[in-house]
Amino acid sequence: MPGKITTKERLQINRQKMPEQASTARAANFEEVNLGFTEQLALLEADRCLQCKDPRCMAGCPVNVNIPRFIGLVSEGKISEAAQCLLCDNALPAITGRVCPQETQCEIVCVRGNKSTPVGIGYLERYVADWARNHSDQLTATKAPATGKRVAIVGSGPAGLTAAGELVRMGHDVTVYEALHKPGGVLVYGIPEFRLPKKIVSQEVQRLQSAGVKIECNVVIGRTYTLPELRERFDAVFIANGAGLPVFMNVPGENLKGVYSANEYLTRVNLMAAYQFPNADTPVLHGKCVAVVGGGNVAMDSVRTAKRLGAASAMIVYRRTKNELPARAEEVHHAGEEGIQFEFLTAPVEVIGNDKRWVTGLKCVRMKLGEPDASGRARPVTIPGSEFVLPCDIVVVAIGTRANPLLTATCPDLKLNKWGNIVADEAGMTSLPGVFAGGDIVRGAATVILAMGDGKRTARAMDEYLKSH
């Protein structure tokens, strides 16, 4: 048993609070909000773990991290061994320690949560991963002998990078193709600096490259190369290009100047550093009053970005109530602290503009909750005669994404579902032998950790396929 501490003593330790920037300061900068545990805080939090004989937390983790083991090693002060343990299970721990929704996965099933608060698994994962980033010289990487098999991976987002890390460790020759000019996919274009610094993504990518992963940027599969061409050159292919095609509201006025998809808005600011314009090349509109339509993590990222760009008023427009928000609780809490306004039970019906076609407002209707819909959430129902206008000069639409047909259009034999997502079996195999797929291009827009789970699981299936072909 790790540590010299009794179960009774463990139960008396309260969950440690994550140090963070003051809300008034952080709402005006793009520096990371959460500051990370000190060694003292990490040791205290690790001592809260009861080291259960039947650790439910592991079953709640999509990448099956051995949570009790790495936390037990932290409790013993063996940080190097904890880092080694964590990196064996998770290709991107410094990233998941920051953006993974632990509160609905590993932490929600933590036994400590039954009577108090769960162990801060995500906070500890971040602490150990950050230690690993700063002490890479103290870690050893294991790698199987070269198999002579070549694998192409389409997309350098969480699914692609995870699969690449696993496959290289298995001894395969892996090349990742990325359409944009920097690797990381949604990790660099979709998640703001204040939640996930680009430096962190870059260091995690560099670690994978040091292990043997090759990455080629500015390569658009479907244009630069087609999928059939990749299949001819490689022994297997893993498609993990995400679901990055924005969905719009289909309301009048949506083509007015000042309307952004969340994809474009966040890509300009995150990947292209538009918040540093004119020192950076890419501009972005700075609204005085910004309305973001949606209630997920992307909506929260967009509205908090708008606030940091100087908006006097930045609001979320969401058709259900706070209880139904799909965004992480921590992000909603941080947004509230930063002065973000919430217009709940509100649905846009038109974007209003002036005679020069610039946005001046968002015409909305009030909603009430009815019977549950297919998602299990209460269906929003329009209240007749409730129309009103929210004044704003920027509208950001963050209501979801769908599959981009650029790649799949070049390969008509690849089976798709009615939404344009690639159909794959439990092992990740598509309708084409040797072609696998995972992440958002299969499951639709989801979380980073679910995409990583797909990447890890599919890598194992690809390894079996490569051994027999």
Image (cartoon, helix red, strand yellow):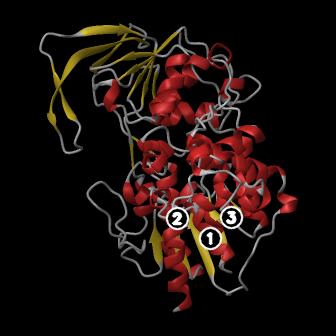
Residue type highlighted by circle 3: Cys
Which picture quadrant has residue 405? bottom left
Q: Nearer the viewer, residue 340 or 382?
A: 340
Q: Is residue 431 left or right of residue 9?
A: left
- Residue matched to label 1: 166
Res 309 seen here: yes
Q: Nearer the viewer, residue 175 or 132?
A: 132
Q: Position of residue 221 (x, y in %)?
A: 54, 62
Q: Residue furthest bottom?
A: 468
Q: 10 Å neighbourhood of mark 1: few (<14), some, or many (≥20)?
A: many
Mark sitting on residue 467: none
Residue visible at 47% across and 19% down in the picture? 258
Which picture quadrant has residue 154? bottom right
- Residue matched to label 2: 455
Is label 2 in contact with label 3 (beta carbons under 8 Å)? Answer: no
Q: Secondary structure at mark 1?
A: helix
Q: Position of residue 394 (x, y in %)?
A: 47, 17
Residue type highlighted by circle 1: Glu
Residue depth check, mark 2 versus mark 3: number of the one nearer the observer:
3
Q: Nearer the viewer, residue 356 or 80?
A: 80
- Residue matched to label 3: 85
Q: Is residue 215 above or below residue 356?
A: below
